[in-house]
Image (tube, helix red, strand yellow):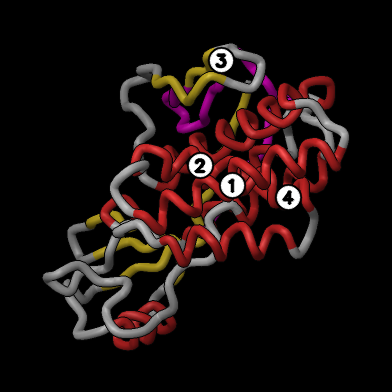
């Protein structure tokens, strides 16, 4: 979950919804700059954070009972394996993208957990094998993953409320072309990405935000039930050249 504190309690955005927002940004990318295996790459982007822990016990709560933001979520080898397994059921390219994302997330933990070390080594072998069998180059895969990562970073800026005020510029991330892209917000609240990487001059993206008034919960089931009953806001952003 992406969890933001508010005056009344919490805003909760599911990570799957963040993935869907990332795809809304991706589909507008200029055709000549798109990676190979376009549809499969979009699907990998949609599902790159799937496989989360089940709603049981206190998997989604902090020690004080607050909804747990993904940034303080303890890593899970089980979730990492689930991500790749779910992706592989669709295609090896989809699994390749998700596997590369898993390595990006978890390689800083190399040497700290034997199970994680085993998982990372398996991903290195998987990726080499999938590249060979798909007859694609390492550079093509890296370009596609860099695109996925850029859309992921942009989506996270939006859902975490990190848009800079007063028309200041914030670097989104280097794009797959190696170019640094910057985000700013105009006085009319429309967003500018510079340089402009999109096919159309203007589009709107959205996500669903759950508003919780309770500050803490006894267990995952209580949180799950509260989210199910919570008011839902469809938050929109207009991105304009």
SS for dot 2:
helix
Quick check: marks 4 and 2 in contact, CB under 8 Å?
A: no
Picture coordinates of residue 65, whole percent (x, y):
17, 74
The spot of residue 172 in percent (x, y) is: 47, 25
Along the horizontal axis of the image, is 11 left or right of 99? left
Q: Residues within 10 Å of mark 3 (few under 14, many from 20)?
A: some
**Residue lying at 14% horizontally and 70% vertically, measured from the top left:** 63
Q: Is residue 51 depicted above or below 199 in this figure?
A: below
* Label 4 – label 3 distance at C-alpha: 29 Å
Residue 159 falls inside the magenta stretch: no
Label 2: how many residues lie within 10 Å, few (<14), some (14-19) or many (20+)? some
- Structural distance between the alpha carbons of marks 3 and 1: 35 Å
Determine whether label 3 and label 2 are within 8 Å by CB. Answer: no
**Count the marks: how many?**
4
The image's mark for residue 103 is 2
Residue beneath the point at 66% across and 15% down: 177
Q: Which mark is residue 123?
A: 1
Question: Mark 4 — residue?
Answer: 94
Asked if residue 172 can be seen in this view, the reply is yes
In space, the residues marked 1 and 2 are separated at their CA atoms by: 7 Å
Circle number at residue 69: none
- Gap between marks 4 and 2 measured at Cα: 14 Å
Nearer the N terminus, badge 4 or badge 2? 4
Q: From this viewpoint, is residue 233 visible?
A: no
Label 3 belongs to which residue? 194
Q: Residue at x 43, y 61 (%)?
A: 77
Q: Earlier in the sequence, mark 3 or mark 2?
A: 2
- Location of the N terminus (image quadrant): bottom left
Residue interval drawn in magenta: 183-207
């Amino acid at each position: 979950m992406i969890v933001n504190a508010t005056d009344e309690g919490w805003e909760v955005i599911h990570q799957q919804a963040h993935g869907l927002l990332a795809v809304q940004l991706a589909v507008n990318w200029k055709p000549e700059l798109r990676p190979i295996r376009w549809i499969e790459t979009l699907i990998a982007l949609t599902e790159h954070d799937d496989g989360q822990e089940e709603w049981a016990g206190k998997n989604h709560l902090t020690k004080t009972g607050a909804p747990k933001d993904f940034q303080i979520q303890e890593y899970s080898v089980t979730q990492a394996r689930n991500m790749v397994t779910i992706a592989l059921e669709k295609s090896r390219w989809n699994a390749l993208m998700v596997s590369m994302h898993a390595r990006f997330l978890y390689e800083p933990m190399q040497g700290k957990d034997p199970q994680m070390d085993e998982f990372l080594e398996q991903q290195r072998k998987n990726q080499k094998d999938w590249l060979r069998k798909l007859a694609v180059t390492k550079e093509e895969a890296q370009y596609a993953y860099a695109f996925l990562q850029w859309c992921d970073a942009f989506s996270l800026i939006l859902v975490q409320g990190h848009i800079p005020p007063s028309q200041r510029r914030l670097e989104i991330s280097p794009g797959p072309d190696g170019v640094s892209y910057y985000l700013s917000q105009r006085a009319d609240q429309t967003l500018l990405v510079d340089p402009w990487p999109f096919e159309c001059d203007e589009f709107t993206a959205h996500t669903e935000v759950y508003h919780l008034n309770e500050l803490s919960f006894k267990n995952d089931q209580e949180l799950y039930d509260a989210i199910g009953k919570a008011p839902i806001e469809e938050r929109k952003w207009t991105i304009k050249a």
